[in-house]
Image (cartoon, grey):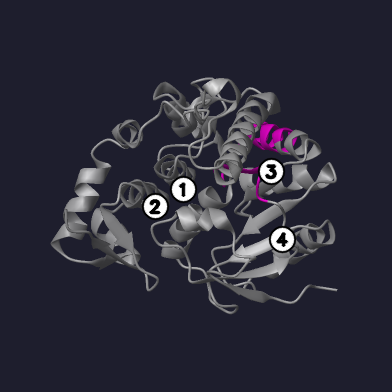
């Protein structure tokens, strides 16, 4: 039996805290399934047009992470996303599918897969009303949710341009650790993911690389919470035993990669795209038509500009430049 759809308002207990990190958190989100613990959520993302090797890597990585108690988050699309979901399911783990449409507007071909997700205790997420159809701009908006729900983001295989690079840009903007799987330069579909490594993204050779960072962040968070509790309980004017106060641990830096570095890989795309948007607000379809670019190329550049706070993508599909 398919679970009922629930609308969770911002401010309610079940609203994911990760979404509060966004500049524009959804006022409500629609959920179907069981809400997991988000403390060890890992986004595994990449191109739709994946190589068989890329899909195998995504499936194996997700399976290993799920066995270690991680929740695998992705976008449900064919290619890397679907392989990651399937890997988590095959290992008996939990996976979260973030949709670019309403939860009642899912293609029939995806229903058996989604039924399995729910049967295994997983979750479907959307910020759109139940019957909303997907549009080009909703995929871009969906990418920011994938990043915000995760504690780490792994790009397995992505060309330039790629929607996965917009997810990477949002991870950087939110201070979420960003990983990329290295591939040989001859793999065209890995041009974008290899570029992330050249600019300083963390190398992901296996699940242990991600788990190490997750554990360090969790330990630092736990220590900070303990110190906050001790400060509340400690009477004014007292100190810790020995007269010393231990400094709060520093959270590991999420990545050496910067948004500037990612934008360099997109070349002149950002300047050309921003120039159009600054002149007048445009819809996604208008940008694709005027520039003569592929939708993927526009989405990747828009994701980087949005993460930099230079534009805003409205729910109606219109893209507007923000005043500097």
Left or right: 23 in relation to 118 = left
Could you tell which of marks 1 and 4 lies nearer the N-terminus? Answer: 4
Could you tell which of marks 2 and 1 lies nearer the N-terminus? Answer: 1
Quadrant of the rendered structure where residue 70 is?
top right
Q: Which residue is mark 2?
A: 299
Q: Which residue is mark 3?
A: 84
Q: Residue at x 43, y 55 (%)?
A: 22
Inter-mark Cα distance, 2 to 4: 29 Å
**Magenta residues (range):** 38-61
| Disc assigned to residue 35 | 4
Check if mark 2's residue and mark 1's residue have beta carbons within 8 Å: yes
Q: Residue at x 83, y 44 (%)?
A: 90
Check if mark 2's residue and mark 4's residue have beta carbons within 8 Å: no
Could you tell which of marks 2 and 4 lies nearer the N-terminus? Answer: 4
Could you tell which of marks 3 and 4 lies nearer the N-terminus? Answer: 4
| Badge nearest the viewer, 3 or 4 | 4
């Amino acid at each position: 039996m398919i679970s009922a759809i629930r609308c969770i308002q911002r401010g309610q207990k079940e609203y994911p805290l990760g979404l509060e990190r966004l500049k524009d958190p959804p006022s409500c989100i629609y959920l179907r399934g069981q809400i997991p613990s988000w403390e060890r959520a890992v986004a595994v993302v990449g191109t739709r047009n994946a190589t068989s090797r890329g899909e195998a890597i995504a499936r194996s990585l997700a399976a290993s992470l799920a066995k270690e108690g991680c929740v695998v988050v992705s976008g449900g699309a064919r290619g890397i996303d679907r392989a990651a979901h399937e890997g988590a399911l095959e290992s008996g783990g939990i996976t979260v599918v973030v949709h670019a449409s309403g939860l009642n507007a899912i293609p029939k071909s995806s229903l058996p897969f989604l039924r399995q997700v729910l049967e295994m205790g997983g979750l479907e997420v959307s910020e759109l009303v139940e019957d909303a159809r997907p549009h080009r701009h909703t995929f871009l908006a969906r990418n920011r949710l994938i990043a915000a729900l995760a504690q780490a983001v792994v790009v397995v295989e992505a060309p330039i341009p790629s929607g996965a690079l917009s997810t990477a840009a949002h991870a950087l903007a939110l201070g979420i650790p960003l990983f990329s799987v290295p591939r040989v330069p001859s793999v065209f579909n890995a041009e974008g993911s290899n570029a992330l490594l050249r600019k300083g993204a963390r190398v992901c050779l296996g699940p242990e690389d991600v788990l190490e960072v997750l554990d360090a962040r969790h330990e630092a968070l736990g220590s900070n919470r303990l110190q906050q509790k001790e400060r509340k309980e400690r009477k004014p004017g007292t100190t810790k035993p020995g007269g010393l106060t231990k400094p709060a641990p520093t959270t590991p830096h999420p990545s050496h990669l910067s948004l500037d570095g990612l934008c360099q890989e997109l070349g002149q795309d950002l300047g050309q795209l921003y120039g159009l948007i600054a002149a007048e607000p445009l819809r996604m379809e208008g940008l694709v038509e005027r520039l003569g670019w592929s939708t993927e190329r526009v989405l990747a550049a828009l994701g980087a500009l949005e993460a930099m706070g230079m534009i805003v993508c409205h729910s109606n599909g219109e893209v507007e430049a923000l005043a500097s």
